[in-house]
Amino acid sequence: MTNRRWRRAVLGILLATLVVALPVASEAKKKPSTKRVVEATVAGKHVKWSGRYLSFNYGASGLTIIGTKVRATKTIGVGCPILLDAVTYPVTFETNCSGQYAEHAGKRYWFNTGSGPPLQPSFQVTFDSFDGTVVAGHFSGTLPALIGATTPVDIEGTFRGPLNK
């Protein structure tokens, strides 16, 4: 084999090795999805919060989830006094969890303190799983009108995401 053919053969082998190895290397770098997301149906309309405007805060007083839309058009909040490491999943709270929803353009706000009947309608939060970093669950209930709104709003949704560090 001539020197030129030898170089072409080596170059071809190197190129083939590189092409075959690239997908494996890129797959190894991919992390499982840890995107924060809250999806809800509010008064029959689907709303989704995700990205940098969604926060999952956890501390000694429990978990609070706060999400807003760009330009703060809609805001949602869920708060629950849970010690995530101290319960068996799934676990449901039918009282003590609060829910909030706001539409800022119409300046309408709804809030349920979580005290439950007979003082307020039921607001329920179920925690489906927690793996030490990512929490998932769902919520539902009625939020009484607070400011600007004249009637309560029914809300039902899900949440999933890593806790803030």
Image (tube, rainbow, N blue to C red):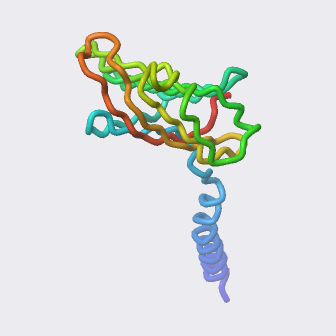
Q: Is residue 84 left or right of residue 78?
A: right
| Residue 2 quadrant | bottom right
Q: Nearer the viewer, residue 155 or 120?
A: 120
Q: Nearer the viewer, residue 70 or 114?
A: 114
Residue 107 drawn at (x, y percent): 27, 12
At horizontal 53% and vertical 28% (from top left) the residue drawn is 65
Position of 106 relative to 136 (above/below) = above
Q: Nearer the viewer, residue 71 or 20?
A: 71
Total numbered circles: 0
Residue 26 drawn at (x, y percent): 60, 58
Which residue in the rendered view is the most extreme toward the top? 147
The quarter of the picture where the C terminus appears is top right
At horizontal 62% and vertical 67% (from top left) the residue drawn is 18
At horizontal 58% and vertical 29% (from top left) the residue drawn is 56
Position of 150 relative to 94 (above/below) = above
Residue 151 drawn at (x, y percent): 25, 21
The quarter of the picture where the N terminus appears is bottom right
At horizontal 37% and vertical 26% (from top left) the residue drawn is 69
Which residue in the rendered view is the most extreme toward the front? 118
Q: Nearer the viewer, residue 73 or 31?
A: 73
Q: Is residue 13 left or right of residue 108?
A: right
Residue 105 drawn at (x, y percent): 25, 16
